[in-house]
Image (spheres, rainbow, N blue to C red):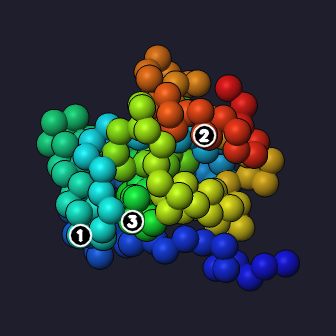
């Protein structure tokens, strides 16, 4: 049995990327049965500095324009190979209507309609799913879905969707 932390990717904490405090939090009842994959449709980023700027911009958009309590995703994944803490493991996200109470939302930073994320990002994403299971926040018998499988959207982009549809436990 691998030790708990051994299969987790590098996670950049909220304080490390400069998050604003959430206006409120709703606890997530874990382990959840679903993990939902998104893309941010924003600019790509390949360094911790540029990815942190992207994540800050997304948090500002979600809080200022969407009027949400915080950045919508539980975690975000950069092409720098890092994972960025959004609402985290135990706070309900705002990423997939009617599914937030039973899922974790992981979003790849960038637009992946016509290109796939690099291997650093894909490996971090796969590792994050295993990490969620090993920490007990995601059910061992979880189902993986793309945002388009639960809401009317093109998210997470055709190219990325093609990749995750071949990952373990995917079900449209």
Q: Disc 2 and disc 3: Cα gap in Å?
A: 19 Å
Ranked by sequence position, the earlier of labels 2 and 3 is 3
Q: Residue at x 19, y 43 (%)?
A: 61
Give the farthest residue toward the left: 64
> Residue at label 2?
163
Residue 40 on image: x %, y %:
34, 41
Secondary structure, mark 3, is: loop
Ranked by sequence position, the earlier of labels 1 and 2 is 1
Q: Is residue 153 above or below residue 105?
A: above
Q: Observer-nearest residue: 147 or 164? A: 164
> Residue at label 3?
80
In-image side of 57 versus 143 (left or right): left
Q: Residues within 10 Å of mark 3 (few under 14, many from 20)?
A: many
Residue 142 on image: x %, y %:
74, 46
In-image side of 109 versus 145 (left or right): left
In-image side of 119 versus 44 (left or right): right
Q: Residues within 10 Å of mark 2 (few under 14, many from 20)?
A: few
Residue 138 on image: x %, y %:
67, 54
Secondary structure, mark 2, is: helix
In-image side of 107 versus 161 (left or right): left
Secondary structure, mark 1, is: helix
> Residue at label 1?
49
Which label sits in the foreground, 1 or 2? 2
């Amino acid at each position: 049995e691998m030790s708990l932390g051994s299969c987790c990717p590098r996670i950049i904490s909220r304080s490390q990327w400069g998050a604003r405090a959430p206006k409120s939090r709703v606890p997530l009842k874990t382990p959840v049965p679903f993990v939902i994959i998104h893309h941010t449709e924003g600019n790509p980023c390949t360094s911790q500095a540029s990815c942190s700027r992207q994540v800050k911009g997304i948090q500002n958009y979600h809080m200022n324009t969407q009027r949400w309590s915080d950045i919508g995703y539980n975690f975000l994944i950069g092409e720098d190979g890092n994972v960025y803490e959004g609402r985290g493991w135990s706070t309900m996200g705002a990423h997939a209507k009617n599914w937030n109470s039973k899922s974790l939302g992981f979003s790849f930073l960038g637009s992946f309609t016509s290109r796939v994320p690099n291997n650093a990002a894909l490996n971090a994403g796969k590792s994050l799913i295993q990490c969620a299971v090993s920490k007990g926040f995601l059910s061992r018998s979880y189902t993986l879905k793309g945002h388009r499988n639960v809401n009317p959207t093109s998210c997470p982009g055709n190219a990325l969707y093609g990749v995750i549809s071949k990952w373990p436990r995917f079900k449209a």
